[in-house]
Image: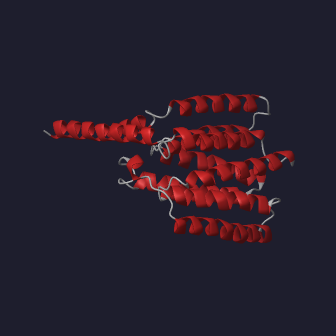
Amino acid sequence: MSNYLHFLAHQLKGWPQQNYYLFFFSLGCQIMTLVNSPITALTITTFIGTTLGVLCILAINAAKSVNGWLGLLSALCFIITGFAAKNYLSMAEQLAYVVTLDLPVLMSANWNVNMVSKIRKFTGKTWFVALASTVIVYFISGYLIGTFTNDPRPWVDAISFSISLTAGVICFLRFNNQYFWWVASGIAQMVLWFISFRQGSATLAMFVNSSIYLINDVLAFTTSPWYNKKERARLIKEENGYSEKEETVGDVTHA
């Protein structure tokens, strides 16, 4: 257990500096949003979820697998927030993240080993499959949620869900092209939660959170190891050094 906790602590280190700046900027925005609205169980839950959620997407940006626990905990909070706002597909979106982004990290030892070295790019075929899948999921989810629930914004909800679901799968498969989908997802979620806020169904915190996600997604194209070759090489070297250190410690322990 102590080795695992040490591993998680290591995963919070070595991020691009901009990631830490963005986290503290986000934390400040969320605190201001929290204190400027009535303090309820829902606003506290949303605050916890947005804080953990930002840490999660920053961990993905930095190609660090600590996003598993961060994503799982934030998803629980966002499911509660989505249910309160009747944005039911946003709840399904969080469950999809748990399946595609969180559980693989928590259950697969291979996923956690120098993940940054396994990054790859789309081919023409995978571009077509990803785009077609997004459109198909949009129409199916929008129809189903509009027909069988009282979601007041089914097609807006469906846009966010279809893009985010596809992005999660692309991330699970370790394609850096995921960030084109994450940018689109950030915009779609900003629209969804702004409309929800204007209609009195959600707090402004979710709109602020979506805007932070969008900033992170744009930032990824410049500083993240998913795209920045220099940063990728640095992290590969760092992770290889960490693995060698752990093996040495393990040998000494068992000696």
In screen coordinates, is 204 left or right of 49?
Answer: right
Picture coordinates of residue 126, whole percent (x, y): 53, 66
Quadrant occupied by the C terminus: top left
Establish if 168 lies above or below 47.
below
Of 120 and 95, nearer the camera is 120
Question: Which corner quadrant of the image does residue 231 belong to?
Answer: top left
In screen coordinates, is 149 left or right of 212?
Answer: right
Picture coordinates of residue 222, whole percent (x, y): 55, 40
In the current view of this chain or complex, which residue is farthest to the front?
124
Q: Residue at x 59, y 39 (%)?
A: 219
In the current view of this chain or complex, which residue is farthest to the right?
199
Establish if 58 lies above or below 161.
above
Quadrant occupied by the N terminus: top left
Question: Which corner quadrant of the image does residue 153 belong to?
Answer: bottom right
Picture coordinates of residue 29, whole percent (x, y): 70, 30
The number of numbered discs placed on residues in the rendered structure image is: 0
In screen coordinates, is 240 left or right of 154?
Answer: left
Is residue 157 at all visible to an observer of this figure? Answer: yes
Of 187 and 141, nearer the camera is 187
Q: Residue at x 41, y 39 (%)?
A: 8
Picture coordinates of residue 147, whole percent (x, y): 79, 71
In screen coordinates, is 191 left or right of 250?
Answer: right
In the current view of this chain or complex, which residue is farthest to the left?
255
Is residue 99 at all visible to an observer of this figure? Answer: no
Q: Residue at x 49, y 48 (%)?
A: 68
Establish if 84 lies above or below 141.
above
Question: Which corner quadrant of the image does residue 50 belong to?
Answer: top right
Q: How is the image coloured?
A: secondary structure
